[in-house]
Image (spheres, rainbow, N blue to C red):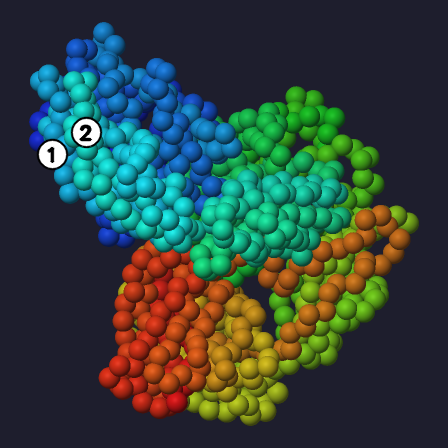
């Protein structure tokens, strides 16, 4: 009997679908209805679809089985759980086979789940598991015909899982089983040696797998499988070693003969790297974390780190161990995602582990609440208020945990009903996000003019509280929402918002530990909305005045820089903005009134670099400084209007006067000073047509003139097109501003924009105010950048309406010491697009470049291709006319760099210049490199 958990995937016989805690009358593999059932306890059912998949159903079970799972020990689920198999024959014997697999990204390693029946326990490592199962064999039901399995998490495992359960009834006729046949072995990169055999017995209880390093023995037992098994993967092998294997069948009556012995010599072993758990560090403490990697004793391991913020350093000790040194600074706060450690051996085989780092305030405890429909569940330290079909009055979430994972006893309740859950939040994926996309993407909303109260209970009347609010809506529709606590009101419009918050500070709870938040829709707003609530608690007097947090750059121009920060104080009399020119000493730039949260520094020089810090003022006293941010002004900006002659925008816009077709070329665009430049554009692919129903304000009050917003290059779902920006200076760095607009779209009009292998999103629906900024772009050796446009999943179409190309000289200057004589005055630099140094590191295939050698080449060219495990690629060689002279697909690549040799056997590759293009078929990302044939 095959049974699997269902969340989103459908699959037919022989699989029985588990839709809830109790399933009865399961069917066997012959479609016969049986009295057998499965029951989960306690009464917890919250499946999800973040299991691994192969893309071609090549795992131990089909992808639909691998992808959906039931979990426990997380998001309010029980720490341990039972699954009972009922309706069995008390006189029979059974084998239970368990499969679990997960690539759930909110934790760095999903760990190991234990399954126990009586005194028998088996354990299964679930992280990216597509091939392995574990079994408990020869089980006898109790008198009621029930076998109960206890499921638990192994040490340091965050979540327990079950995807599938196979129940096998054992048949016994008093004879020993027949021997298995056709034993074979195959090296599987990154996994080990996979053994397969033919199941020739009808009455086996399982199979024993034996291994030796000598054909004459002695053999040791590796594993005992369940009945019906035809494969086993030996993950304990060393690299470059010859092994010998044999298998036999077993049951209670005896054993079969052994198979013939087979041998296999293993390939290089990929280093093993110990998982690193997510870390939480206070911003006034230092922490060291030891890193350990292992490989064959004869191999040497090099450890490297990537994605580290500036206050984290890594030292490779040279012996397979290393040390992370974490030294956050005063007023540095935030979540730093996907910090990565990689172990690579001399054969260039590598393995990486990732972890998240949470830097929290030493004096403030924060409790974070995400309002979500359940499809977007945020990771720790978020508490997810999962809204059902409707956010009814009385919906609540209790026992909230703070960022230290400590139960605060706080409960948040929707005192009044809201209209529905929203899934329209901002998602640009360009590094500007304050919180995870799962928080920004969802929320709850209403359209009426009533008060919608949120009641917070379980607060400590001896503490003081700040309440921080965020809403996010991925269109230009107004969602201006008022939040009022104890007579204080703040307002926020979440239109295209990914990082702006407002907060009410210094609140004293009522004697019963209660605070009521009144939420209303502002006049003229389409919706009232909330995406997240952060409750900050502190002891009165612990800090005289709290300094600002999350200082960030929100906009860059040729002569101005826009700043934004969070106001956490309730007693400040003003704010000071300090600036450093190019890394020199700070000087006081401006003093602002109390409650200020933004500042625009105008009148700056072009193509210049600056650093900023901000602090609060309370009379004669001053708070600590904020984090420092690095900013720059542009040398020039070239604005391109994707339009026909029907929508001509004024200077400095370059109007394309576009005609439908491929191969159009534009040269010498003017910049913002109307000076001709070398910048041009080539349309390398066909768009499906022109969309001319962009937003029209009637008075040019949008972010761009109406003539720019009116027309867009358009694509239908599933289509892709590219444009190439030419004439760029390869010594400069560029930021691209992308805009698109659709007036009459109901639903989603999100397009995906890919540059240099990384993809970003922008929703054009009713857009008159949102732009996608892609920062830090470097042209190729020809001074060119290719922009790929396609429709995003579920979108009605993809649009490109305007592109602004901004150039500047990047600097390696570092932030100077903060001014003044205050303790712990060091500051950590946050880049222009980071949220208090929130950092999302890119995947290896996004950051690692192709290499080719020798270059120039004569007859043989070797290309080194970085990839993830099991990536599939297509490698093409293209001449200067665009003709493909060589093309081949390569499947199942290894983690790290893969070596591919191109042999010019038939002299099809003549002397000249070529582009090697590698397309990653799993993600559709591309990399290129120029090569020369002698």
Nearer-the-camera pick, 399 or 594: 399
Residue closer to the observer: 677 or 208: 208
Which corner quadrant holds the C terminus?
Answer: bottom left
Q: Residue at x 18, y 24 (%)?
A: 255
Q: Is residue 627 left or right of residue 317?
A: right
Residue depicted at 62% across the width and 43% down the height: 290
Which residue in the structure is indicated by mark 2? 249
Q: In this view, does 662 lie above or below 59?
A: below
Q: Determine whether label 2 and label 1 are within 8 Å by CB.
A: yes
Residue neighbourhood size for the residue with mark 2, other residues' Cα within 10 Å, grouped as few (<14), some (14–19), many (≥20): many
Above or below 635: residue 529: above
**Depth check, front residue: 620 or 242:** 242
Q: Does residue 838 appear left or right of residue 601 in this picture? A: left
Of 488 and 596, the residue lying toward us: 596
Determine the CA span between mark 2 and mark 1. 9 Å
| Farthest front residue in view | 216
Disc ID at residue 182? none
Q: In which quarter of the image is residue 806?
A: bottom right
Sequence-earlier tag: 2 or 1: 1
Q: Dividing the picture into quarters, in which one does residue 532 lie? A: top right
- Residue depicted at 74% across the width and 26% down the height: 462
Q: Which numbered circle lies on residue 200?
A: 1
* 64 lies above or below 257: below
SS under mark 1: loop
């Amino acid at each position: 009997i095959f049974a699997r958990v269902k969340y989103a995937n459908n699959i037919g016989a022989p699989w029985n679908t588990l839709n809830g805690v109790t399933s009865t009358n399961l069917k066997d593999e012959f479609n016969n209805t049986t009295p057998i059932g499965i029951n989960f306890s306690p009464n917890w059912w919250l499946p999800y679809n973040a299991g691994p998949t192969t893309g071609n159903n090549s795992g131990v079970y089909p992808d639909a089985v691998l992808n959906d799972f039931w979990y426990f020990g997380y998001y309010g689920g029980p720490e341990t759980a039972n699954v009972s198999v009922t309706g069995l024959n008390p006189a029979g014997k059974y084998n239970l086979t368990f499969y679990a697999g997960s690539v759930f990204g909110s934790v760095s390693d999903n760990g190991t789940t234990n399954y126990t029946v009586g005194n028998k326990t088996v354990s299964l490592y679930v992280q990216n598991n597509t091939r392995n199962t574990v079994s408990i064999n020869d089980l006898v039901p109790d008198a009621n015909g029930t076998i109960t399995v206890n499921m638990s998490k192994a040490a340091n495992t965050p979540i327990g899982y079950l995807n599938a359960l196979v129940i096998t009834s054992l048949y016994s006729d008093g004879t020993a089983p027949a021997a298995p046949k056709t034993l074979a072995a195959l090296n599987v990169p990154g996994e080990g040696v996979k053994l397969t055999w033919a199941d020739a017995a009808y009455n086996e209880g399982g199979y024993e797998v034996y291994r030796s390093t000598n054909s004459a023995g002695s053999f040791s037992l590796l594993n005992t499988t369940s009945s019906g098994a035809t494969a086993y993967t030996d993950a304990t092998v060393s690299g470059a070693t010859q092994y010998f294997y044999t298998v036999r069948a077993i049951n209670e009556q005896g054993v079969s003969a052994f198979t013939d012995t087979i041998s296999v010599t293993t390939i290089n072993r990929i280093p093993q790297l110990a998982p690193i758990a997510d870390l939480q560090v206070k911003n006034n403490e230092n922490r060291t974390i030891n890193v350990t990697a292992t490989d064959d004793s004869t191999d040497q391991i090099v450890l490297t780190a990537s994605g580290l913020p500036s206050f984290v350093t890594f030292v490779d000790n040279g012996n397979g161990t290393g040390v992370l040194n974490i030294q956050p600074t005063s007023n540095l706060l935030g979540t730093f995602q996907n910090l990565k450690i990689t172990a690579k051996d001399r054969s260039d085989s590598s393995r990486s582990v990732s972890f998240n780092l949470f830097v929290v305030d030493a004096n403030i405890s924060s409790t974070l609440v995400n309002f979500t429909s359940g499809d977007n569940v945020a990771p720790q330290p978020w508490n997810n208020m999962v809204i059902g079909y409707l956010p009814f009055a009385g919906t609540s979430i209790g026992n909230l945990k703070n960022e230290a994972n400590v139960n605060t006893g706080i409960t948040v309740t929707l005192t009044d009903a809201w209209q529905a859950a929203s899934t329209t939040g901002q998602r640009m994926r360009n590094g500007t996000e304050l919180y995870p996309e799962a928080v920004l993407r969802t929320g709850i909303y209403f359209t009426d003019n009533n008060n919608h109260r949120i009641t917070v209970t379980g607060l400590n009347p001896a503490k003081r509280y700040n309440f921080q609010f965020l809403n996010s809506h991925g269109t230009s529709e107004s969602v201006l929402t008022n939040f009022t606590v104890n007579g204080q009101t703040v307002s926020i419009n979440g239109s295209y918002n990914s990082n702006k918050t407002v907060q009410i500070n210094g609140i004293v709870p009522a004697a019963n530990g209660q605070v009521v938040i009144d939420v209303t829709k502002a006049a003229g707003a389409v919706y009232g909305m909330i995406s997240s609530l952060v409750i900050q608690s502190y002891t009165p007097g612990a800090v005289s005045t709290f300094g600002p947090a999350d200082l960030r750059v929100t906009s860059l121009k040729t002569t101005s820089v826009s700043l934004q920060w969070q106001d956490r104080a309730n007693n400040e009399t003003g704010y000071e903005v300090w600036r450093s020119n190019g890394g020199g000493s700070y000087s006081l730039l401006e003093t602002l009134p109390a409650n200020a949260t933004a500042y625009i520094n105008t009148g700056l020089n072009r193509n210049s670099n600056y650093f900023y810090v901000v602090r609060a003022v309370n009379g004669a006293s001053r708070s600590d400084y904020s984090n420092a941010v690095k900013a720059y002004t542009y040398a020039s900006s070239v604005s391109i209007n994707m339009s026909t002659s029907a929508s001509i925008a004024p200077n400095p816009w370059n109007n394309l006067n576009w005609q439908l077709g491929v191969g159009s070329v534009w040269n010498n665009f003017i910049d913002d000073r109307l000076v001709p430049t070398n910048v041009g554009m080539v349309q390398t692919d066909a768009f499906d047509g022109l969309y001319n129903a962009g937003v029209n304000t009637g008075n040019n009050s949008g972010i761009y003139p109406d003539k720019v917003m009116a027309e867009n290059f358009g694509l239908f779902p599933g289509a892709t097109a590219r444009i190439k920006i030419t004439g760029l200076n390869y010594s400069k760095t560029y930021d691209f501003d992308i805009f698109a607009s659709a007036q009459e779209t109901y639903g989603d009009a999100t397009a995906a924009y890919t540059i240099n292998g990384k993809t970003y999103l922008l929703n054009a629906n009713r857009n008159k105010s949102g732009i996608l900024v892609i920062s830090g772009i470097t042209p190729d050796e020809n001074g060119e950048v290719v922009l790929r446009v396609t429709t995003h999943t579920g979108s009605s179409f993809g649009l490109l309406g305007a592109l602004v190309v901004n150039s500047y000289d990047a600097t390696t200057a570092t932030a100077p010491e903060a001014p003044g004589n205050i303790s712990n005055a060091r500051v950590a630099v946050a880049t222009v697009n980071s949220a208090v140094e929130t950092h999302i590191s890119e995947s290896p295939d996004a950051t690692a470049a192709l290499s080719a050698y020798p270059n120039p080449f004569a007859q043989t060219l070797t290309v080194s291709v970085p990839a993830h495990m099991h990536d599939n690629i297509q490698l093409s060689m293209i001449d200067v006319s665009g003709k493909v002279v060589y093309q081949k697909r390569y499947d199942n690549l290894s983690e790290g760099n893969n070596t591919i040799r191109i042999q010019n056997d038939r002299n099809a590759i003549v002397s000249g210049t070529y582009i090697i293009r590698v397309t990653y078929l799993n993600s559709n990302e591309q990399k290129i490199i120029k090569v020369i044939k002698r």
